[in-house]
Image: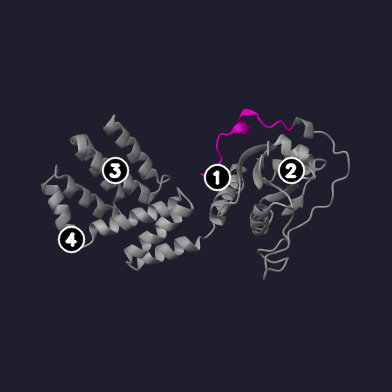
Amino acid sequence: MSDPRITSSIFTRGAVDLSALRTPAPSPAPAPTQAAPPAGIPAGVPGGSAGGVTVIDVTEATFQSEVLERSLSTPVVVDFWAEWCQPCKQLSPVLERLAVEGGGAWVLAKVDVDANPRLAQMFRVQGIPMVYAVVGGQPVDAFSGVVPEAQLRQWIQAILKAGGVSVAEPEDPRLDAADDALMDGDLDAAEQAYRKILAETPNDAAAEAGLAQVGLARRVSGADPRTALAEAAAKPDDVDAQLLAADIEVLSGQAEQAYQRLVGLVRRTAGEDREKVRQHLVGLFTIAGPEDPTVASARRALASALF
């Protein structure tokens, strides 16, 4: 699982044919079962499993009602497993614990491939553990094998958003530690922590922003803001002076002015200088994040300046 988000896949091209399952179940569905709450969390309190169905065992006979129909209102994560599968014994408990933590925001449906071979065949399961997300009656994303819990959490967050579930971003103690190091001025420790996060969860936007902030802090270290801005005003075509001025403006809460400064510099430069300015500006965008409206506007201006 390389990127925890809803992606184009074989499912969107109709490769999984579930029509045979859209028929009345031949036998009554077994009562849903709930995963035991994690150690130290009793049922009936926040973090327990009393808020609704969280984990169910599913068969071919109950797949329509417990997965397809349920997914019309609640995202369902389907875990294909088997008793003999050692990797399944690593992944399944984590999925069960996260489902309990979700408090009913999503449901984990467990399918024993030995007892339900036709389901495994329909989903083209070639190895286990294999995990599918079903939203709105259709599979939308999948991954195989054991993945780190942090990456699994991000994947589930993406599935919930795809299902229209309003979710709060979970706190990440790794990010808290990295941010604390940055705030304390320990740039080496902060950089190491952010890089470790990115190694474990590539494309983590918060870690990328933190790493960009470390670079910004290093670049402005020892610089006098007034002197730097005055020098940039006196030397409008001095690339290094303009880059430092833009950094100081970002730190001063004047990001829009910094972006405008560098977009203008892109228009006035060429070759290696132009690419240097472009990369610096993109790095400043990373600090604010892609959803910042000022970044969106500056990106359009940058595209216009480049092309």
Q: Which residue is mark 1?
A: 1
Q: Please state which of the two labelled residues, at mark 2 or mark 1, is closer to the viewer.
A: 1
Q: Where in the figure is residue 74, as x and y percent of width and height?
A: 69, 46
Q: Please state which of the two labelled residues, at mark 3 or mark 1, is closer to the viewer.
A: 1
Q: CA distance from mark 1 to mark 4?
A: 46 Å
Label of residue 279 in the image: 3
Q: Which residue is mark 2?
A: 67
Secondary structure mostly seen in the magenta stretch: loop
Image: 130 above or below 306 = below
Q: Quadrant of residue 142?
A: top right
Dot 4: few (<14), some (14–19), or many (≥20) neighbours within 10 Å? Answer: few
Q: CA distance from mark 3 to mark 4?
A: 24 Å
Q: Please state which of the two labelled residues, at mark 2 or mark 4, is closer to the viewer.
A: 2
Give the mark nearer the N terminus: 3 vs 2: 2
State yes or no: discs 2 and 1 in contact (Cβ < 8 Å): no
Give the mark nearer the N terminus: 2 vs 4: 2
Q: Residue at x 29, y 55 (%)?
A: 216
Instruction: Check disc 1 and report its element: helix, strand or loop.
Output: loop
Give the mark nearer the N terminus: 3 vs 1: 1
